[in-house]
Amino acid sequence: MALSRRKSFRQRLGGNPYPRDPGRAKRKRHEQVVQYQNQLQSLLMELATSFINLPLDDINTPIHQALRRMGRFVNADRVYVFEYDFDGQVCNNTHEWCEEGILPQIDILQGVPLNLFVDWVQTHLRGETMYIPDVLALPVGSGIRAVLEPQQIKSLIAVPMMNTDECVGFVGFDSVRAHHTYSLKEQQLLTVFAQMLLNIKLRQQADQALELQRRFQELVADIATDFIAVGSVTIDARINRALQLTGEFFGVDQSDILTFYRTEEGLVARVTHEWCREGQPSSAALIHQFPIDDMPVFRQKVLVEKSILHIPCVDHLPVEAVNERMLLERLGIKSSLSVPIYTDKVVYGAIGFEARRQEVFWSGSQIHGLKVIAQVLAMAFASIEVEKALMDAKDNLELRVRQRTAELTEQVAAKEQALADLSEVQNTLMQVSRAAGMAEVATGVLHNVGNVLNSVNVSCDLLMAQLQGSRVVNVSRVAGLLEANRERLAEFISTDERGRRLPEYLSSLAALLEEERRFLRHETGTLGERINHIKEIVAMQQNYGRVPDVLESLLPETLMEDALKLNAGAFSRHGINVDRQYGNLPPIVTDRHRVLQILLNLIHNAKYACSETEHSPRVVTLRTLVSAEGNLSLQVEDNGIGIPVENITRIFQHGFTTRRDGHGFGLHIGALTARDLGGSLKAHSDGPGRGATFTLEIPYIQET
């Protein structure tokens, strides 16, 4: 039945093969050829249009339909698509259409060795079409004939699918029932058809690659997120999860972490974490560790160059990688990838992927993503090292403190009890903060009192010197002289040389004694003023040390000035100027102690920020004003070292500090105290080197 439908190419172009008018028949034949080619072009245009919006999740059905339409149009019995696998040196039949009564060959033509038809492959590699008008005309010993003749193929054309200069496969048209001749124009149009099929395949591959890349990026982001704020308790579980996710994504049989350790024998690589696909052996069980110096290629790439060691095939290893080859072959590994885990200062190890069942090749984008994961692991390892160092330092510090003072036993017990009760922790921190504030105040008081005592010592020395050299002792001498001449006093004064000089001497002595009296009065007055100054300083410290929670009515500027006076010595030592910008504000009823506690810390921090900068002049600005909400705003601004943007909120967290001698609870307690007062404590800075402003806002309660 199928045979009755088929016509020869000559019959399709015009009924009678022997026309009476050769010229007319030639013109008609030409017109029919042109019409045939136009129809073939129209069919190609129609197929190309249908391929434009073709869903790429299932392209097999549209390709099969296209093969059928093209095969019937060119009168072929079988149309098929082959893909070359030059790595495996075979080709595979991926799609096939057969006319009724024609036996399919797709199941047979899988893994066909390329060495059976070398000329065929070489023709396609040059981008040329393999056209065989008559298979039986081929030499008897030809490999191509040996493949085609058993399929009863009489004529054949195989058009290469070229991706730029690379041949990836071909589209073939078999004529089984009759010989078929293809014109040059037909061959050109069939080449277009082959390219159309290739474009569909390339679009699908590109879409699959994009989807794979998207999934891989999501995987990398998921793993990176998983390692945020990782600690020593959770890091092992997260590393194992990362190994499993990446291993399953790449379809490998094993993923692991090699960690480098320094031993007496030298540097070794040890398997510390491992994931294995079900049914696959563990490398850690076979080889727990190996000396790095025994693996020269691994050592050079990973440890020295800090670069990727990509081994798609063990056979491709360089000659000098003898030990690496032996190790991989012993473990049955066909492909391997090692990505170094390192920071600027240290190489921690490598994350490795191994394939045993088949060879695996990692693309550049995938390797880049794995580098990101390796960097995440490196940062996690560095964080754990810092955490361990801090824990060791903490343990050593506690040990030294316990050895030096027995009082810390009670403090450690209080700390352990406080950890069980959040409110007790806060109270303990408040007490510690107040103690630190009192210590700061005591330091300022001692420094200020010391300055005044220096002046008191000078005044005392002057008074002692004046008293030791005083002329008042001469008065007793004059009195003794007069007492000795009491009976002849008139005669003594008039006739005796000493008596005649006595009035003049008494006059000059009186002037000297009056000068001494004025000097002593001035110095004793100065001494009294300085002693009163000491009393004022001590009274201020006592006022600060009063029991909290006592409300007083105070001028806002008084609060600022009291806090400033207790830091005045430090400001003077560091050459820091104070710019006072006080508003004319009424008194406020508040807890003097708590407000002073916050202001003392803010002014002390401002002093520190200015002392650490090279700016000149160093200025701390103090402001009192009313906020838009009607609260009292007490601002302390400095032109010091500034605060990075990422630390603006972190500085109020307990334990966070950027100072070498800081404790990390001053601002934290200040913020809690401000909240207890019904207000807030905020910070602002434009960045490092641009100073900072701290604003304490408390409710403006006035005395009724």
Image: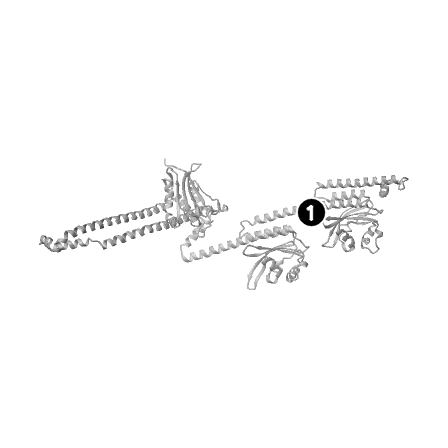
Write the residue at 76% across / 43% down.
66
Query: Where residue 325 appears, x then y in whole percent?
Result: 65, 61
Which colouring convention does the figure follow? one colour
Write the residue at 65% across / 47% down.
212
Q: Residue at the far top: name it.
A: 704
Q: Please tell me how many numbered marks the rendered image carries.
A: 1
Quarter of the image containing the C terminus? top left
Q: Is residue 380 left or right of residue 664?
A: right
Quarter of the image containing the N terminus? top right
Query: Where residue 32 appears, x then y in whole percent?
Result: 83, 40
Q: Nearer the viewer, residue 484 or 675?
A: 484
Query: Where residue 531 appears, x then y in whole percent?
Result: 29, 48
Q: Nearer the viewer, residue 6 or 481?
A: 481
Q: Residues within 10 Å of mark 1 (few under 14, many from 20)?
A: few
The residue identified by callout 1 is 205
Give the answer, above or below, for where 263 lies relative to 660: below
Q: Residue at the far bottom: name it.
A: 265
Is residue 550 shown to the viewer in this render? Answer: no
Q: Which amino acid is tagged 1?
A: Gln
Q: Which element is circle 1 on?
A: helix
Q: Nearer the viewer, residue 599 or 289?
A: 599
Query: Where residue 169 appears, x then y in whole percent?
Result: 74, 50
Give the answer, above or below, for where 665 lies relative to 266: above
Q: Is residue 663 left or right of residue 178?
A: left
Is residue 168 shown to the viewer in this render? Answer: yes
Q: Is residue 421 left or right of residue 454?
A: right
